[in-house]
Amino acid sequence: MNYFVTTSTPYVNGEPHIGHALEFIMADVLARAARQRGDNVIFSTGTDEHGTKNVQTAEKLGITTQELVDKMSLRFKELLKELNISNDRFIRTTDADHEKRAQLIWKALEHDIYKAKYVGWYDVKEEEFVPEAKADPERMKPTHPQAYQKLEEENYFFRLSKYTAKIKELIESGEFRVVPDTRRNEILSLLSEGLEDISVSRPKDKLEWGIPVPGDKTQGMYVWFEALMNYITVLGYPEQDDFKNFWPAQVQVIGKDILRFHAAIWPAMLISLGLPVEKTLYAHGHITMDGKKMSKSIGNVVAPGEILSKYGVDPFRYYFLRHIPSHNDGDFSWDAFEASYNNELANELGNAVQRTAVMVQKYQGGVIGNVVKAEHDSTPIVQALDECRFDRALDEIWDQVRGLNQYIDEEKPWEIAKNKEEAEHLRDVLAYQAGCLLEIADLLVPFLPDTAAKIKDVFESGVIKPTVGTLFPKNEIVHTKE
RNA sequence: CGCGGGAUGGAGCAGCGGCAGCUCGCGUGGCUCAUAACCACGAGGUCCCAGGUUCGAGUCCUGGUCCCGCAACCA
């Protein structure tokens, strides 16, 4: 089976933060799980790089816009590497190929695009239109010192209104799955109200850093509209085999804040193109920091690198996958992070590996013998993953870790070892322990790839590898808050 | 009445009609293979408030109260 999974493309006007990391990791689990069961996978991510904001930021920094987006795009690429993300593609919306194909898509959408006047409040200082909904009523009064101007400009519009009913139908029939249910309800209620056509271009003088509208030198494509297209330009829409074989995407992973773009505008574009809509849209929640919303202005944004440099990649992946509720917002705090590291990774899993390995070495000279892989029922995990419940999936795996520790306590191999006549029984018990750990390692492959590989390395050959050090050492933790 | 989410033991969550459950933390005991790790047991809850439906309601309905998100950097 062909399996295409994407993340959203972060806008490069800011440094990567743990929210981006969360999204990358979740999509990575889906991709790795699909590969593990033998699917052909394309996992795509990238960066969204056009728009006036980048031009302004670059000006402030005294560099060219190109330099800015190159630099920031690289930062995201580095983060992907640090997080051990297994993406097959990395698309930049400034890639020549994307720009070329975006224009092809525009042309294919032209039957639903028309030119009209856009009238709205214009913020002179910020040089942008302010949507009615977020406009400050005070500033609508002409007497206000920073009053908006009522401006109008010519734009191209996309006939979104035409497709709301169809999208609603696709969601309701389950053909287009929106996960979790709260997000599905949210978008359904939005669709019931009906959506208005949206402006999808800007006059060239206000959007010098963008993709030109084909056949109209005075207009550039609105960034959002064009960025969405990355999901198919990356596959080589319209003529390449990857596109033919891998679209529709199996899962598109996004943040809840951009739900309407991906659950309404993007499907409308696809339908207009005569293409199927993605099978599943999964919207994760946002991360709060000690219960507060992360924001640059409050200054409580945690850089992924802070955590990664102290604990390494798997503890990072573990915390965000298990302790940020997959269907909700979640909180990050150093206390909670350290508790999860110490109790769950070091004490429960790491120690189970350690005590098993040590006993085999002590009592049997390192020889495990006939390792039979344990076979627990994995359907709850498969099901959890299908619903994008990464937290639940790890709960299930940890039930097995706990079960193993219980088993060891009940069997008391150290007691059995005292009686030479029971050597065979001891061998069976220890082999079973090793088997459980190998099964756990298998289950962990999509979540904690390095850890899974290390555990396999210890037990797989039937002889304990003495070279393997402690998993999740506690004494190396540098506990520094802030 | 803009839209949406939420209120359950000290903390974080699950349960969504039938004896209040999980993880952490706390207390007691056990064990000694192990990373001062592991295992067992226990204490701790008027399930936000007020009505209603029902033989029976955290769970459904109505009306409140209080938090949070979306609309400003931002997944």
Image (cartoon, coloured by chain):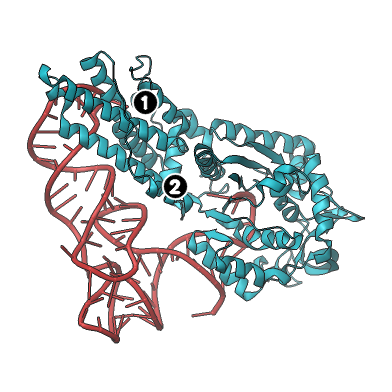
Chain colours: A cyan, B red
Q: Is label 2 or label 1 in front? A: 2
Indicate the position of residue A231 as horizontal and vertical percent values: 69, 48
Q: Is residue A92 positioned above or below B53 on the image?
A: above
Q: Quadrant of the N terminus of chain A?
A: top right
Residue at the location (57% across, 69% down)?
A188
Report if residue A115 is visible in the image: yes
Indicate the position of residue A112 as horizontal and vertical percent values: 80, 66
Q: Amino acid at mark 2?
A: Phe
Q: Amino acid at mark 1?
A: Leu
Q: Secondary structure at mark 2?
A: helix
Please report, as a chain letter, where disc 2 is located: A
Residue at the location (29% across, 34% down)?
A348
Residue at the location (57% across, 44% down)?
A20
Report if residue A324 is visible in the image: no
Asked which quadrant contains residue B1, the reply is: bottom right
Report the side of A342 relative to A446 (left or right).
Answer: left
Residue on which the image places disc 2: A390
Residue at the location (14% across, 20% down)?
A417
Asked which quadrant contains residue A310, the reply is: top left
Report the side of A274 relative to A184 (left or right).
Answer: right
Report the side of A176 relative to A67 (left or right).
Answer: left
Q: Quadrant of the C terminus of chain A?
A: top left
Which numbered marker is on residue A471? 1
